[in-house]
Image (cartoon, rainbow, N blue to C red):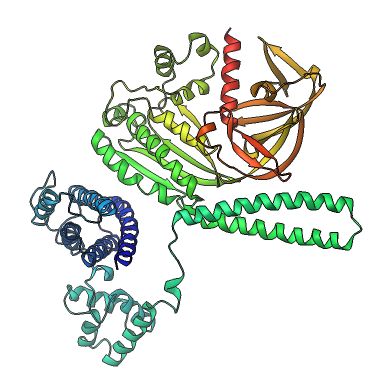
Amino acid sequence: MNDEMAEIRNDFLAEAQEMIELLDQRFISLEADPTNTDLLNEIFRAMHSMKGSAGFLGFARLVDVTHRAENILNKLRQGDMAVTPEVITVILEAVDVVKLLMQDIRESGTDEHTETEAMSQKLDQVLAGRPAGGAQAHAPAEPAQPAPASEAPAESEPVPSKLGEILINEGAVTKEQVIEALDRQERKPPLGEILVQSAAITERTLEAALQKQEKQGKPAKGEEDQTVRVETRRLDSVMNLVGELVLGRNRLMKIGTGIEQAHENDPLVRELGETLAQLNLVTTDLQLAVMKTRMLPIRKVLGKFPRMVRDLSQKLGKQVRLEVQGEDTELDKSVADEIGDPLVHLVRNAVDHGIESVADRHKSGKPVEGVVRLVACQEGNSIVIRIEDDGRGLQIEKIKAKAQSKGLVSPAELAVMEPKEIMNLIFLPGFSTADQVTDVSGRGVGMDVVRTNIRRINGTVEIESQPGKGSVITIKLPLTIAIIQALLVEVERATFAIPLGSVIEAVKITRSDIKAINGREVLNLRERVLPLFRLAEEFCIPSDNQQEIFYVVVAGLGDKQVGVIVDRLRSQEEVVIKSMGDYMAEIKGIAGATITGEGKVVLILDIAELVESARMGWAAGATA
């Protein structure tokens, strides 16, 4: 019984968490559209469902808070109380308390360790129409236009609007008759009863319509069992197994190719080739299917930002509107888990540093309300997220002064930097342009965390800004971080894998094509000076350096590009990234390891670190 109750409790917590996310989003939408009765009813049903489930499991304090909030929501949807920002603020505070209660239940199995008395009193004051913590007394709202969804459900007619729709579609009544009946209803007799009393329809017509309504309301057989909740660790386990299968497939394909070349006339070998081709196809389809099961819409990540922007703008005394686009864009759960914190930092910075105060925007001739826009989309094999604002933009001179005063860069380095490179200094550890430290920003850890977390999942982050017009931060992320396409290269018989997403092109050169500027090797590639570095030197691989012909893999992240000198290009292969473990985690320039089709362990290069290292060395050499 204990195991059963624990499972029921976990299911409740999972469902309640989804409801909490929904409530945060819906309340912000309701604040922008106070007369939306459908939205009010959706919020009311979510709160009512949470209260009912909590009551079944015996969580008394959770029931108490949700019941009082439900009473206020009921008054709002009946038009007895106005939907105002003050009322919504108090209910959002109640939602925060519900979050604390759920955390208490998750950790201790009970909600008795969370204090709710103060919140209950505040909700009671709002319900009574008295000010509560800034919430002002609310006069009854103007009678809302009767909307079927806002009516209290009747036992025989769960959704009166559906009944009215059925009767209109069948020609039993007109739309005007239904509207007139709803005007007379005043939340007392059911809609059908009013229509019968006014002789608009007969009782037989009503009974047939109710039966049809009930039939439409029931899901098709088996429809309610179309989804199943699966723990993430199980999906991770399946993904790991598919990764091993991909490695095994690669090995078999390599062996099969060798056998076919040696015994091409053998009928059994031809059958083996056909079987391997089929295995390759099925493995690829299985890999795609498993990856899709791990994909989730990015709204799961973006859903918390409307509430966060609302609270933060009120705290800072600013007027900020958040716009979200592309919420249905899907990405891997492992990527979604990693991108949450960076996005929080970027949105907070946009509201705090980017958007000006009301007075400053008025002086600049801008609308008083600032706009922060979150846009997500898929471009090729990457997920692109843009954080845009119409604020003051980055101040180049202020960034230069701060970077120099903190010793992050030298005056000589700043002298040769382009504006875009100077903007990217904000991603350095310890950098902040805030004049004073607050609980919102100014500690110089936010943007560094952004770049570190994004690089960890092989992503990139760039910033563009125009003074006085705003900034755009662009994040590019891989669809998945478990299985990637890679270019295998060889250096002095050592093989490395370069993630294909970082490869721009590969060119064949001779020793005479390599030039030197201030002691650094460079390549003039289509009128552009490309910094070069040798993998053999980077990883201390002994080399006789007598080779005349080389290959340069042009790799880059955003506007930063570097040429990697290798001896030979081997092949393009699908590889599974394996962690190097804590013992070797600090090795610079290595993202992980994989096993090739030949059964060899190959290191996967961290292009982000290598590019940064090469660029810093190049800048130092240029200023020497």
Depth check, front residue: 392 or 540: 540
Q: Nearer the viewer, residue 428 or 317?
A: 428
Is 553 placed left or right of 259 in the picture? Answer: left
The quarter of the picture where the N terminus appears is bottom left
Quarter assignment of residue 195: bottom left
Residue 482 in the image: state x and y as whole percent.
Answer: 57, 46
Residue drawn at 44 percent across, 45 percent down:
337
Say which quarter of the image contains residue 528: top right
- In this view, 165 is above or below 555: below
Is residue 470 among what the camera can see? Answer: no
The quadrant holding residue 517 is top right
In the picture, the quarter occupied by the C terminus is: top right
- The vertical placement of 198 against 369, above or below, is below
The spot of residue 103 in percent (x, y) is 27, 50
Quick check: can you spot residue 162?
yes
Asked if residue 610 lies left or right of residue 11, the reply is: right
Q: How many numbered discs, if any? A: 0
Instruction: Name the residue at the right extreme.
Output: 265
Q: Is residue 352 left or right of residue 459?
A: left
Residue 479's place in the image compared with 499, above or below, is below
Relative to 18, is 499 on the left or the right?
right
Report the residue at 49% width, 45% height from top.
Answer: 335
Where does residue 355 sit, x and y in percent of width and height?
A: 34, 32
Nearest the viewer among 83 and 619 is 619
In this rendering, the answer to whether 480 lies above or below 553 is below
Q: Position of residue 415 (x, y in %)?
A: 52, 11
Q: Residue furthest top?
A: 624
